[in-house]
Amino acid sequence: MARRPLLTLAVLGSLLCAPACTKTTGPGAETPQLVAPDTINDLDDYGEARNAYALLAVDDPGRAAARAQLRTYLLAYLDHALASDRTPAAVDALEQLAGLWVPSELRTLAPDPELAAAAAAVYGRTAPAGDERPALLALGLSEAFGDEGQRTKARANYAKLEDWIDRTAEFGNDPRFNDHLDRLLEDVSALLPSPFLVDQLAGVYLGRYRDAQRSGSFSSTSDPRVPFTGYLLARLYLRADDPDAAVAALDRLETDAPTAALRDLIRDAADSSASGRSPADLDQLTREFLPEPDHRLPDEIVRQSWGIIDNLARRSLARFPDHPPAHLALGRVLRSRNLTEAAIVHYEQAFAGKTRATDRDDLHRAWSELSTLYQLALETRAASGASETSAMLERVEAFHERAAQTWPQRAIEPGITLAWMTVAVAEFNAGHIDRAEALMEQTVALEPRSAALSLLGVIAMRRGDFDEARAHLRRLDKLSGALSDQLERYDWQISAHISLAEVEALAGDREASAEQLREALRQLNTLLSYPGLADSLRAEFGLRRARVFFYLGEIELAMNDVRDAQRLAPDRDDAYTEPLIFTVIHGHLDQAAELFAAALARDGGGELGVYYSLWVLDLAERLGAPEPKLAREFLRSYATSDDGDPWQRKLARYGLGQLDDDGLAAAADSPRERSEAFFYEALQRWRGGGHEACLELMTKVLDQQMMGDFEYQMAQSYLRWKELPKTARTAL
């Protein structure tokens, strides 16, 4: 099992479900309120701050300061991304910046030349590459926030972009319609409904409408959008949170009966918002734009719809703060934007209201949506090792208790067993094996799940309780045989057979192990012979077949499968790590050196390169072979890198002889780090002739209970053999 990856600068949107700091709102409160961190130092902090910001009303006195903090971080992030030649990351930051202002705030902006300049820098990267969407977003931000000179330049560049799109329209999907510009504007104005972008899109709509008027008939136009001009304008102005402009636009056009009805509904909703009479009209208008779960709408229209719903829900809550339908609508908006923690707050407020938030079927769907949000929040905490994981699990369990009481005849998915398994895997990776085992047993008792049985089998096997491991894995094989999906059935059956083979090998029954491997090989050959298998699946099952070949002693066949997997899925760490572990453990230096070189050629090695280097250096010295030059060079480079993880840098220095045993042990302050310190000291002791001391240290590696780590698997094999091989040896 690979190590948990360190948090790196990545797509910002996916980080917004990171857990926010919480404090209880009061006795018996179901939902904590979100509190932004004092400073934003990394993407975790940004996720917390952004979720907290999403809960602030437009008139909240703290909104401007909170936005300024987010803006400062995003501009620094954007500058760093551009300096590192990572334009997509800079575009991500630009999209996040665009989302910090609601339409009413965009209409009253003060100039922000620094933000406008940052947007112009992104335009300078994206426009020459023909990347129109981020280029238009950058122009929109430059025009909205620039001083007079910046705004003039942005408008001139927009004219160039408009001319470019017009001249290249014939190369579009359907040149008859020439709708590329309006679709692009729809997409960008859904993110940034600034007055300039709204005016440009309205001009495109009306220009096409007037052309059709001059031709004499709307029915004869080849453009299917022209008859819906009124509806499109209404959507545009509602996204800009300007219902009066929507009504006025419709009043100036010839409209059909449905559009006239929409015009009346918009007018009534605006009146209700102003008078505070009743939220019913706002609710009805909101429902008009709510995307259906199985919709097939273009992405830009979906984003625009959620923007409209955001405006309407906030209008409703400004007048009716406890209105359940508005809370549910806003929760769904935030869910669509990956603001998980903020969305949970609004869903819970919707369900806590005195009136029903929606009709019964949709309400059940909303409960399932909230279950998914809780699961996402739990997974984020568990993956990052956050200390609040247990507290979050208690919240999830309490939610599922309420769900069972509310919907006794209809299950809410995802269910509680997925939450238990999520935390169990995190506990397993953290070395809390008893807790992981208890949660998986709890899962299996309620609902037999393949993943739970698999992990229970691994835990029992690592502990040396082979009878219990066999029982779990045979149950997994039987359960998998009843699965209706053929691919899923093969997946888990193969996993069961390979794990059973490992159990029998550890128990010393070579023939039983070989029998399980042969059955796994038969199933793998069947799967891999299917010509329509996707590359990702071919790589996955090819790596599993490589593992079977390795165990059966067919080293070259295994390496062929590994090479194919690396070609098909070069970004998979396990296409390098798992084969390298096997070849190192069993003393296959040539194959280990090949895998090591391929890993470094792929991405320079990264954090895992430290471990790879230590393994191959140890193996080469143990076998009396020349050391791989690349390995020592990598350790030297990593040890002096400012970007390297502090613990991995210490390991690199240890491998170079720049840090002694006591220094490494003193630096280890977690079970994982202590396990690694014991293991790499053990390797040195063995090479120095201290075989008994080495095996004692290997025992300490197992005592740390980091069963999912590389070092645990390697130490377990060495202790079983009571040696570190000096020559290549068979697995069985």
Image: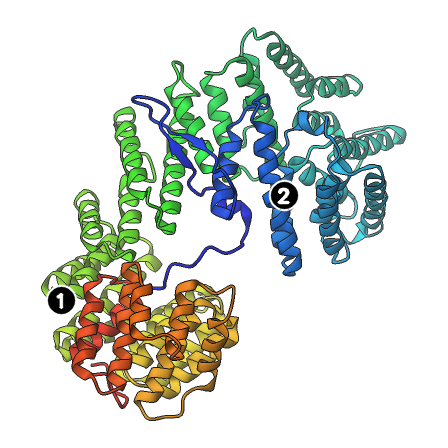
Is residue 173 in view?
no
Residue 437 makes an appearance in the image: yes
The furthest residue to the left: 467
Horizontally, is 692 left or right of 130 in the view?
left
Front residue of 437/284: it is: 437
Q: Give the image location of residue 107, x and y in percent.
A: 72, 27
Q: On the image, numbered disc 1 is attached to which residue?
A: 464
How crowded pointer 1 is (Cα within 10 Å; few <14, some 14-19, many 20+) is rated as some
Q: Mark 2 is on which residue type?
A: Glu
Point out residue 634 in the picture as x, y percentages from the top left corner. 48, 77
Q: Residue at x 50, y 47 (%)?
A: 43
User: In the rendered image, which quarter contains the C terminus?
Assistant: bottom left
Q: For numbered disc 2, what is the local secondary structure?
A: helix
In the visual, does 575 lie left or right of 457?
right
* Residue matched to label 2: 95
Instruction: State the scheme by which the image is colored.
Output: rainbow
